[in-house]
Image: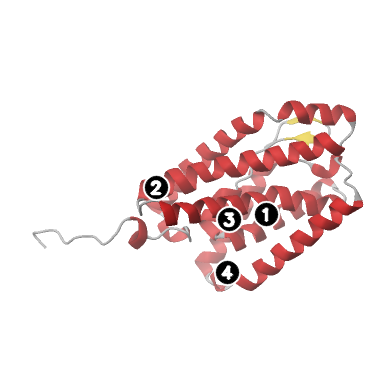
């Protein structure tokens, strides 16, 4: 969603900036920065950001100021962890804002709804599945890599659409209201794409996925009787 079409009141902008500042402070204090110093880790981070940027550019513009696209936030959260996922999404959104000339006043709300919210929901679903469900590869794929993206995309799209419906120009606001039911369809698409990508990664490149470990989800391998 392009939230630059919704001129928010000053109070909303200050609240969004404050929450964003708190999220940035948490990210700065807890992020695994050493992973970026590693050659493989830095390549995974930069590659994930580049793919996410292309994903955000693949958006059919339904109306001026109202466009929709997949987020990739859940995949970034599972691959990089929530802190580096926030950093990557912030870099992607800053590049898009520079390319499209978005006003700086729209960035705090955009980052809050399209980065912080989906990353937080994706991480919450992952943590809940780790605590409440059995340690199993299929639980990880269906809960964290499928359910999490569906929840994150639906909630983020609905929140952005509601904001546009409340504060955008009348014609754009009407389109945003009509777009709300389609958030469920985008949530299913986000879940399907993320589930397929994460399945391939945990099978062929599990070392790239920071939230996955063979010891936790596959368990110790028993020695074969002839070895």
Residue 218 place in picture, x, y as percent: 31, 56
- Could you tell me which residue is drawn at 48 percent across and 48 percent down? 144
Spatial distance from mark 2 to mark 4, Cα to Cα? 29 Å
The image's mark for residue 139 is 2
Spatial distance from mark 3 to mark 4, Cα to Cα? 12 Å
Secondary structure at badge 1 equals helix
Query: Which mark is in front, 1 or 4?
Result: 1
Tell which circle, 3 or 2, labels the residue nearer the N-terminal end.
Answer: 3
The image's mark for residue 116 is 1
Tell which circle, 1 or 4, labels the residue nearer the N-terminal end.
Answer: 4
Q: Which residue is identified by label 4?
A: 36
Tell which circle, 1 or 2, labels the residue nearer the N-terminal end.
Answer: 1
Based on the displayed image, in which of its 4 quarters is residue 17 positioned?
Answer: bottom right
Residue 32 place in picture, x, y as percent: 56, 70
Spatial distance from mark 1 to mark 3, Cα to Cα? 20 Å
- Could you tell me which residue is drawn at 35 percent across and 51 percent down? 136
The image's mark for residue 31 is none
- From the viewer's perspective, tell me whether residue 126 is left or right of residue 28: left
Tell which circle, 1 or 3, labels the residue nearer the N-terminal end.
Answer: 3
Above or below: residue 6 compared with residue 97: above
Q: Which residue is identified by label 3?
A: 47
- From the viewer's perspective, tell me whether residue 90 is left or right of residue 163: left
Neighbourhood count class around disc 1 (C-alpha, 10 Å): few under 14, some 14–19, many 20 upward: many
Neighbourhood count class around disc 2 (C-alpha, 10 Å): few under 14, some 14–19, many 20 upward: some
Q: Do the residues bearing badges 1 and 4 touch, measured as CB atoms within 8 Å? A: no
Q: Do the residues bearing badges 3 and 2 touch, measured as CB atoms within 8 Å? A: no
Spatial distance from mark 3 to mark 2, Cα to Cα? 27 Å
Tell which circle, 3 or 4, labels the residue nearer the N-terminal end.
Answer: 4
């Amino acid at each position: 969603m392009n939230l630059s079409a919704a001129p928010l009141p000053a109070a909303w902008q200050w609240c969004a900036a404050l929450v964003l500042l708190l999220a940035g402070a948490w990210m700065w204090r807890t992020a695994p920065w050493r992973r970026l110093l590693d050659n493989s880790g830095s390549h995974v981070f930069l590659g994930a950001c580049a793919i996410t940027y292309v994903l955000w550019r693949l958006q059919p513009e339904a109306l001026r100021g109202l466009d929709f696209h997949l987020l990739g936030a859940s995949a970034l959260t599972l691959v990089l962890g929530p802190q580096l996922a926030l950093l990557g999404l912030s870099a992607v959104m800053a590049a898009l804002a520079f390319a499209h000339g978005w006003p700086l006043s729209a960035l705090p709300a955009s980052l809050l709804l399209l980065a912080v919210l989906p990353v937080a929901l994706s991480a919450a679903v992952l943590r809940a599945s780790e605590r409440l469900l059995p340690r199993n590869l299929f639980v990880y794929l269906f809960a964290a890599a499928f359910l999490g993206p569906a929840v994150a995309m639906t909630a983020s799209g609905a929140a952005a659409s509601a904001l546009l419906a409340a504060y955008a120009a009348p014609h754009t606001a009407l389109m945003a209201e009509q777009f709300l039911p389609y958030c469920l369809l985008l949530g299913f698409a986000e879940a399907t794409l993320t589930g397929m990508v994460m399945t391939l990664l945990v099978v062929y490149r599990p070392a790239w996925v920071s939230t996955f470990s063979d010891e936790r989800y596959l368990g110790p391998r028993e020695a074969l009787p002839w070895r």
